[in-house]
């Protein structure tokens, strides 16, 4: 099968970009193979999620129900229910698929990296290799931060039901669990912002001076993006996502500034070394030419008296 074919190992970089280029057909074949492998990984992860469904769903549902019931105003009841006969099956399928995506995510990143890496020089690959573990840490930080603030967010929403006495909240079974998963995924992805900014800075597509100059516009964009990304779309969730993102953005700008200053210093030192080497080579050539000229003049002086004596 196509996805079982061995991936072409990249050629060692020899300094000539033409040696590294593949034809369009080769690129498409490589992309096809990696997409098929990625889909296979998601399917395998979903099968694992299907068998782990009971434990995962019970854990998440107990957390959500605990937060909801603890925040219920007096006279308000809460219950979950299925409204269609197929809802239980669809709930299990959707949650299993989401678990499959989460379980296969590290391998999907490796497939993406395997497709991109051959196009980069070894010196360009090194910074991006360091970003992988940092990306995972930031994702876990975002998901953990969301997990910590979720009970407060749920209490915030449930608190409005106090305005309606003797009401019963009928929640579709599994909907709050998916809300939690979507929020955690959104926070985990949003916490990747520093890596995006840092990567653009490493590729010199953005400079620290530009980021500092337009930080207010960037902060505004972050708040707008947070309002779009958060599944609930409320101001509380938006603020809980946007404030840490702005802080992480400013931290990433600081590191981009440090990195670019270091690069400029290294380039200046390399330029100074090249200039010193060129000057030294020029002095050596000049000294060699002077020596050859002196030897030539000495030979001419020696040849003159010899010719006179022979006459």
Image: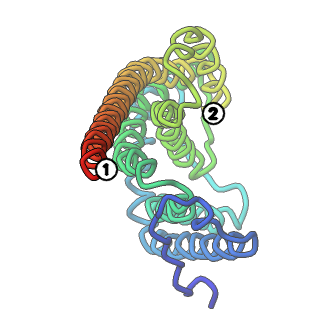
Q: Earlier in the sequence, mark 2 or mark 1?
A: 2
Q: How is the image coloured?
A: rainbow
Q: 264 or 206: nearer the eye?
A: 264
Left or right of 88? Residue 250 is left
- The numbered disc on residue 311 is 1
Q: Is residue 77 visible?
A: no
Q: Number of callouts in the render? A: 2
Q: Is residue 145 visible?
A: yes
- At x 42%, y 25%, the residue is 260
Secondary structure category for the residue under label 2: helix
Left or right of 232? Residue 240 is left
Task: Return the residue at label 2.
Answer: 229
User: x, y (%) of residue 17?
Assistant: 59, 59
Q: For residue 254, which quarter of the picture?
A: top left
- At x 62%, y 41%, the residue is 170
Q: 261 or 311: nearer the eye?
A: 311
In this view, the mark in front (2 or 1)? 1
Q: For residue 144, which quarter of the picture?
A: top left
Task: Name above or below for residue 10 compared with residue 291.
Answer: below
């Amino acid at each position: 099968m196509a996805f079982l074919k061995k991936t072409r190992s990249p050629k060692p970089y020899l300094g000539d970009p033409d040696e590294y280029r593949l034809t369009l057909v080769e690129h498409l074949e490589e992309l096809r193979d990696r997409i098929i492998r990625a889909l296979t990984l998601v399917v395998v992860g979903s099968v694992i999620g299907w068998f782990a469904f009971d434990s995962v769903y019970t854990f998440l549902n107990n957390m959500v129900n605990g937060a909801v019931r603890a925040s219920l105003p007096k006279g308000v009841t809460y219950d979950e229910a299925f409204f269609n006969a197929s809802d239980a099956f669809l709930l299990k399928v959707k949650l299993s698929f989401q678990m499959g995506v989460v379980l296969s995510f590290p391998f999907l990143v490796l497939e993406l990296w395997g497709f991109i890496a051959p196009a980069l020089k070894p010196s360009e690959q090194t910074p991006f290799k360091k970003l992988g573990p940092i990306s995972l840490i930031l994702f876990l930080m975002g998901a953990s931060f969301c997990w910590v603030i979720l009970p407060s967010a749920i209490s915030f929403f449930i608190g409005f039901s106090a305005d309606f006495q003797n009401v019963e909240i009928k929640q579709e079974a599994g909907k709050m669990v998916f809300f939690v998963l979507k929020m955690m995924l959104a926070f985990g992805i949003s916490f990747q912002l520093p890596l995006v900014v840092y990567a653009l800075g490493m590729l010199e597509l953005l400079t620290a001076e530009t980021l500092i100059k337009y930080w207010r516009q960037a902060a505004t964009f972050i708040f707008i993006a947070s309002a779009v990304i958060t599944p609930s779309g409320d101001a509380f969730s938006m603020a809980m996502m946007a404030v840490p993102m702005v802080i992480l953005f400013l931290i990433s700008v600081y590191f981009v500034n440090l990195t670019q200053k270091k690069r400029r210093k290294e380039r200046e030192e390399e330029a100074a070394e090249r200039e010193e080497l060129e000057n030294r080579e020029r002095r050596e050539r000049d000294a060699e030419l002077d020596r050859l000229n002196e030897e030539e003049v000495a030979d001419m002086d020696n040849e003159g008296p010899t010719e006179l004596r022979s006459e």
